[in-house]
Image (cartoon, grey):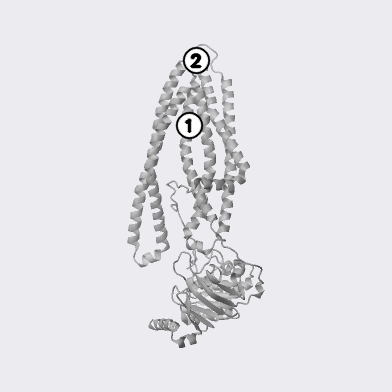
Amino acid sequence: MEHKPRRFGPGSRNVGAVEKAKDFKGTTKKLIKNYLSQYKLKLAIVFIFAIGSTIFSIVGPKILGNATTEIFNGLISKITGGSGIDFGKIGSILITLIILYVISTVFSLIQGFTMTGVAQKLTYKLRGDLIRKINKLPISYFDKRTNGEVLSIITNDIDTLSQNLNQSITQIITAICTIVGIAIMMISISVSMTLISILILPITGFILSKIVKKSQKYFKKQQDYLGHVNGQVEEIYGGHLIVKAFNGEDKAIKEFTKANDELYHSAWKSQFLSGVMHPIMNFIGNIGYVIVAVLGGYYAAQGIITVGNIQSFIQYNKQFTHPIGQIAQISSMIQSMVAAAERVFEFLEEPEEKETNKGNIDENSIKGNIIFKNVQFKYADSDRITINDFSAEIKQGQKIAIVGPTGAGKTTIVKLLMRFYDVDKGEILLDGHNIKDFTRGDLRKQFGMVLQDTWLFGGTIKDNIKYGRPEATQAEIIEAAKAANVHHFIKTLPNSYDMVINEESTNISAGQKQLLTIARVILANPKILILDEATSSIDTLTEIQIQSAMDNLMKGRTSFIIAHRLSTIKNADLILVLNNGDIVEKGTHEELLNKNGFYAELYNSQFNEEEAS
């Protein structure tokens, strides 16, 4: 089957529960030193304009209070026979207020625009670093990780970092400035009223902490079950043909309903508790407003403060709790941001493939002579030695078949030859050069590979065929397609070579996909061919059609054929029979049958199976 990235919806990470970094301080230092330090000037602009915007916004209620005081004094003056309300003075106050709010808005827009630019440039750089890193990581890294884990770093973690960085820096500056500024303005109006407002905060904080603590476990449970639900939907959608074939619809619905019920109950509780916080805050805040209003009325009657100042104070009092709640929210955002950054940095710090080339090797001198000398290899995550003591000598242009039972090490030999992994002991020589003396890129240019699992990307048929040789002409592409016996099929398609293969490659059959991958290798024109179960997805008739083309392709080239169907490798120049990582037999098809050994046993068992079928 073709390799396609798995898709992940919401719930790939437990975003409801606050994720914490293992090394908060160290990760924050890396983020600042390696990335944010490049934007010092822009961050300074953000800082200055965020402070300016907040200050201008805070001063507004006090000036508005002056307008209220002026109206109140004018009314009293009118009642007592005075000149009445001075609309000119009120007008100038309101104009001043509008100017302040306009400046505050402009400052806010400038800092928002600048911070968005910093966040996007930083994540742009990080994505580039991640993609470059992926191409430098050894294959063994991906043996230990699922596709989803790697994709989640590039998508979810980068998005979390970008969004939270953009919001948290400006919000934390704004919140701190707002708290300090409002506190100063409140104190300037009345110290005793300010103390009453501050005394209410610990009560609010205590109640909120209890609610948050209780809701946290439900948020985590909600995200866990959201992940289960998404996983079940993805699994059932991906395998819906199997579900239908085995009448598994009822079972799938029951499993989904069970997880969905748990998600419903945990989501209901978490959302309810989360929704309760605002009414409680408003209730406690309203009690504070009543006390402030009563005390303010008393002070106004005593002539201690003006009516406008009471109005200003009540406005400040309303605003005072908002930045405190904002800081609590920001702290969660920063935790999630640093946790995401930590995973990104861990990925970027993974050991890379080490190049060991000792000098330039003339590619034109490569003919295809290969020697395996006492090769031993074990996968890092395995306790069993996969290749024990493999030695073989292959001459230029020979057709080598590698056969054996599942797990014998056939595909591993090919992976070692192409340096997807390096040998633990022994060496592999290509025309007298240790393959470690090549860069991996130069070495792999010598090989063409057709795998059992076809890989096609979303694009035109033409682009897929010339993947290994982008500069190929249309005529060369057509010749390669003809050699793979796929040209006639392509011509029957709408738009011919320009037909777009859809995202899941479902608009062509499995056999046709395999033929296209064979055409891709033919076009690349390598000196060494590797065919790993290359005809496994092709029907018998199609296999016969392409066999002659493959034979012509392999003429003059060293070819390795890994096959389970032994009938396909009868004309091989040399057959290596592997079992438990060792060569147990080698020779031509006739020689091995005459030995009546392990190969003969394998061949006869397949022959008997084919006869029985």
Q: Which mark is residue 375?
A: none
Q: Residue 327: image x %, image y %?
A: 48, 38
Which residue is label 2 attached to? Answer: 76
Which residue is label 1 attached to? Answer: 319
Q: Amino acid at mark 1?
A: Gln
Gap between marks 2 and 1 measured at Cα: 30 Å
Q: Secondary structure at mark 1?
A: helix
Q: Is residue 381 left or right of residue 276?
A: right
For residue 197, above or below residue 265: above
Q: Residue 296: image x %, image y %?
A: 45, 21
For the residue pair 492 and 189, the one nearer the viewer reads as 189
Q: Amino acid at mark 2?
A: Ile
Q: In which quadrant of the rendered image does the C terminus lie?
A: bottom left
Residue under the image location 46 percent in, 47 percent down: 20
Quarter residue 399 falls in: bottom right
* Circles 2, 1 touching at the beta carbon (< 8 Å): no
- Number of other residues with Cα within 10 Å of mark 2, as a class: few under 14, some 14 to 19, many 20 or more: some
Q: What residue occupies the far top of the structure in this picture?
A: 81
Q: Is residue 264 left or right of residue 559?
A: left
Q: Secondary structure at mark 2?
A: helix
Q: Residue 602: image x %, image y %?
A: 43, 81
Q: Residue 64: image x %, image y %?
A: 53, 25
Q: Is residue 542 visible?
A: no
Residue under the image location 49 percent in, 61 percent down: 5
- Number of other residues with Cα within 10 Å of mark 1, as a class: few under 14, some 14 to 19, many 20 or more: some
Q: Earlier in the sequence, mark 2 or mark 1?
A: 2
The mark lying in front, picked from 2 and 1, is: 1
For residue 162, above or below residue 372: above
Residue under the image location 51 percent in, 50 percent down: 342
